[in-house]
Amino acid sequence: MNLATAQPAASAPEVWTPPSKGKVGMACLILAESAIFIIFVVAYVFYLGRDISGPTPRQVLELPILNSICLLASSATITVAVRALQRGAVRAFAIGWLATLLLGGYFLVGTALEWRKLIEVHGLTLQTNLFGTTFYSLVGLHACHVIVGLVLLLIVFGLTLAGTVRREHAGRTEVLALYWHFVDAIWIVVFTVVYVIGR
Amino acid sequence: MKTTTSPSLAVAAPLSGPDAGRRTALEHLHEWVVTVDHKKLGLMYILYGLLFFVVAGLEATLMRLQLAVPNNTFLSPQVFNQLFTLHGTTMVFLVGMPLLFGFANYLVPLMIGARDLAFPRLNAFGFWLSALGGILLYFSLIGGMGMAGAGSAPDVGWFAYSPLTSKAFSRGHSTDYWTIGILVGGFGSIATSANIVTTILCGRCPGMTLGRMPLLVWLNLVMCGMVLMVISPLTAAQIMLLLDRYLGSHFFDTQAGGSAVLWQHFFWIFGHPEVYVLIIPGFAFASEIIPVFSRKAIFGYPVMVGATVAIAFVSFGVWAHHMFTVGMTSVGNTFFAISTMLVGVPTGIKIFNWIGTMWGGKIRLATPMLFCIAFLFQFLIAGLTGIMLAVVPFDWQLSDSYFVVAHFHFVLVGALLFTIFGAVYYWFPKATGRMMSERLGKWHFWLFVIGFHITFDTMHIPGLLGMPRRIYTYDAGRGWDALNLICTLGVAVQGVGILFFVVNVLRSLVKGVPAGNDPWDAWTLEWATTSPPPEYNFAAIPVVRSRRPLWDLKHPTDPDWKYE
């Protein structure tokens, strides 16, 4: 007799399917990451307009419209890709995944070009003033997350090309997609705070 | 009640064959280094915490020796600053957190009837990151390359107020070791917390609904959820500090318009919930030990869960009570005073419920219970001085005095450390298969409780008399002399108590009475398996129908599930 069998079998508890471990784990990571971003956003808003020397956001920042559209679109393509894999359509998955990679990559290139212009034309660096400090750290923290996401996407894409990604991996790609959606959602916050309200 | 040692509880018959021959010490070491087993990692966390507990305790002893008499020259001001920085940082990040994660690691899967945490390899990763953080902090002692080229420990205090941490005022790399050590350890804490939350939400055995989980599991769920949200602000602030120190940014650089007060906000947004992160697992131990030694089910289970969640919620809105003397608006002061006093309500409910559990129970005064009873009294006093400090004008008078030091040592030693000792005595038989000595345990308890009160009751008074914290010495004739001497003498008594504890642990490992599966006649699942549990915990995954599955098993005619 032991615990597993000691209970009356007739009234066995209803079958309970636990939530996906990957999704819950990723939700925990997203919670922790959100707290980090909140602090950087608070610092950005707190120091907004407190500079004792220029340049100011209004003077140098341009709306990164195309960039933002690309990043947000990548959320759609990754969803399409994951759905395709759930159906077992590996080819469609690969195409959607590649589109996500390219859109994310374009966003990163766009950020790099923006930074280059800010540094070379406007002379704005991390050291210039409080705006430079908070702008580069907040946007840079987001860009770091994009880079991590791209590396993970690239690994999965490589595995897909090698033919090891199959239908049963749809759940795992879904977890990765959650992270990618988070990166996009953060960009909406950063865009609103830095480029809309802060300009 | 005679079913305690009944063979019916032996869930786990050994499945695997005998190990092939004797293994060398190197093979044992290798096994522990590469392990992903939650029990081994839990024990490693606990050993790591106890090791640093001795180190940080010795640091405190050195400081008390310096302060025993006025105008003492035993330690230089520089060394004294390094000691209080190391003592505080070590006790919070390298003792408190690892010990609590260790217990959570060891107990949570066993209590919910799981074979391991949700992500065993992530668990090992989290442990080794935390270990690396501690090693980095202490490496500064030999490798911090201070100005003279010698090693130097960080000396900015455990909350490292800006601008003390800027390049201009913290030369060398000691502050960088402090920053990076905490940053790395923080990543480990986040990994482990995510792991434990996932385990609790996804890994429960059949029948183990949220409403049937042992309180320890509930409280660790709340604690780990808090860690996810409170360690991150600290991580963010440390990244900013690193950017300031290495890349010349201006977050906390007042000359470029930055704000030193912002660091205080960011630090205490972490720092105050962190106190609850530390104490909630202490509550968890008490909530398991007190019912078993009162022979009654916990009083007010749903209220206990609700109060814990309420404490966690309110604790996110109290941080600036550490900053009343900074000069906030009266609205800010009032808000944080009220929110701080509000924490007292759910905390009072918990104390009420623990007493309600003991009320009318058949109390067994074994060592774990003794520590928990002392915890109740001491935590009450800690809470009362906390409410006093929440009164803004009172805080203006006593902020940064020894009264505050006495207050938070009542929380962290009088409440948390006492429950940790209780937990060690309670679960040692499960982890090792041997009982700890009750005789030595009682020596440990009484010496430690007496030493604790000699030191920390007395410490309130020099604080009220105006003695600031963090001074390396003081002039004679201010009325502090005798009181400081008494505080230091108390440390000696505590030290002897700790010695009894260490001797008890080592002796019981070898000579302890075999414990059997369920030495305390307890009710939670960890006591259903062997002591120590096999690697797979349970040969068959258990099925539970109430909050006290072992009670149901031992009393088939009067099971709990009929009444819940």
Image (tube, rainbow, N blue to C red):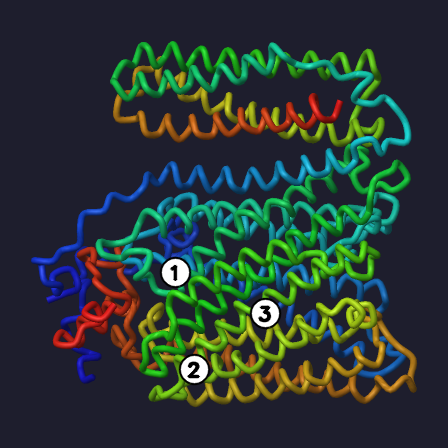
Which numbered circle lies on residue B217? 1
Q: In the image, A155: left or right of A165?
A: right
The CA distance from mark 3 to mark 2 is 24 Å
Q: Earlier in the sequence, mark 1 or mark 2?
A: 1
Considering the numbered disc 1 on the image, is that residue within a helix, a strand or a loop? helix
Q: In the image, B140: left or right of A53?
A: left
Q: Which residue is mark 3?
A: B344
Q: In the image, B362: left or right of B167?
A: left
Q: Are marks 1 and 3 on the same chain?
A: yes
Q: Residue at x 80, y 13 (%)?
A: A120
Q: Quadrant of the rendered structure where residue B5 is?
A: bottom left
Position above or below: B440 against B530: below
Judging from the image, mark 1 belongs to the subunit labelled: B
Q: Which residue is mark 2?
A: B369
Q: Residue at x 74, y 88 (%)?
A: B486
The CA distance from mark 1 to mark 3 is 23 Å
Position above or below: B200 against A110: below
Judging from the image, mark 3 belongs to the subunit labelled: B
Quadrant location, the C terminus of chain A = top right
- Image location of residue A34, percent across then percent down: 56, 38
Look at the image and tell me whether residue B185 can be seen.
no
B247 or B542, which is in the foreground? B542
Q: Earlier in the sequence, mark 1 or mark 3?
A: 1
Judging from the image, mark 2 belongs to the subunit labelled: B
Q: Earlier in the sequence, mark 3 or mark 2?
A: 3
Q: Name the kind of residue labelled 3 in the image.
A: Gly
